[in-house]
Image: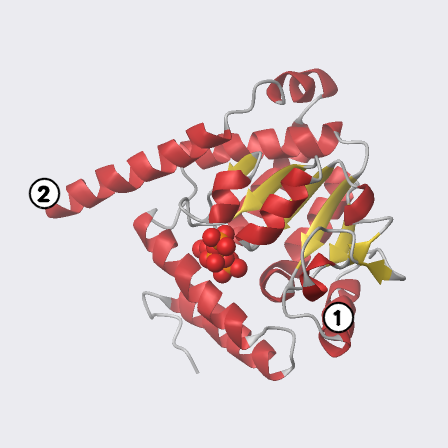
Amino acid sequence: MIPKSHPRYRSLITRKRLADLSKTGIVSLEGLTAHGRGEAFDYLLGEETTTSALMAEKVAAALLLSAKHPVISVNGNTAALAAEEIADLQRSSGARVEVNLFHRTEKRIQAISRLLEEHGISLVKGEVSRYIPLDHDRGLCHYDGIHSADVVLVPLEDGDRAQALVSMGKKVISIDLNPLSRTSRVATVPVIDELTRALSNISGFCNSLGPKEAASLIHGIDGTGFIRDALEYIRRRLLDVLD
Ligand code: ATP
């Protein structure tokens, strides 16, 4: 039992959920360590959405709304932490949702798909093939999903795959608390924020943006600017801590 009065209650509950779901195979052991890296960066960012990240979330929503074929790629950690938020975003953006795993086994695909479907998410299903130019199973995806997408949202993605998607000509929206990760650095729109906060904000913008505003937001996107803002925000916070 984790007491509600604990100052890090939310973080402890999240860790417990991930640890529990690692026993079912939904979360991989590697996913647990990736979560730790995310938490460290959330500490540095003050555990709240920065003004710059909120702007990135607005641009991300505009990209999803303006896309012909938007797809949300979901891995084990994303499903474990944010199935409800993904369901909301599918409703508000009309994007397809595809389960796409780095540590891919049929058993994990089935367990994660079940969890997402229990939350009302409709999934791209059927055959997968190695459409993404990466060796081994990391390159597998669905023809009607990521292969045909013009915009792909990749929460908690690894840098190689994000880069490969960009090299296929896709616009990539990442959600990653690490502004220095290769994923953030190659993404068209790096959203440097915690997963559940980011997804809720993007859904909110999908519900409120009109087509004109969305069209104007997707011109001249400055991904590097969002990274610079995050690093500057961290730098200032660290200096303040010492004051
Ligand atoms: P890259 O390959 O992009 O350089 P990496 O090797 O860290 O980075 P992964 O470990 O595959 O890539 O990615 C996980 C990333 O997700 C980490 O950078 C971590 O900061 C981030 N992350 C983990 N949990 C969360 C979360 N809840 N919200 C947002 N980001 C998170």
Q: Using the rendered view, name the quadrant where residue 219 is placed.
A: top right
Dot 2 or dot 1, earlier in sequence: 1
Whether disc 1's CB lies below 8 Å from ligand 1 is answered no
From this viewpoint, is residue 182 visible?
Answer: yes
Whether residue 178 sits left or right of residue 131 in the image: it is left
Coordinates of residue 55 in the picture (x, y in percent): 50, 30
Mark 2: secondary structure: loop
Q: Amino acid at mark 2?
A: Asp
Q: Using the rendered view, name the quadrant where residue 114 is placed.
A: bottom right
Q: Residue furthest left?
A: 243
User: What residue is shown at x 64% (from left), y 70% (from top)?
Assistant: 103
Q: CB of mark 2 within 8 Å of CB of mark 1? A: no
- Which residue has dot 2 on it? 243
* Closer to the camera in the image, 120 or 70: 70
Coordinates of residue 128 in the picture (x, y in percent): 84, 60
User: What residue is shown at x 71% (from left), y 57% (from top)?
Assistant: 139
- Which residue has dot 1 on it? 109
In this view, 92 is above or below 67? below
Coordinates of residue 10 in the picture (x, y in percent): 43, 64
User: What residue is shown at x 58% (from left), y 64% (from top)?
Assistant: 77
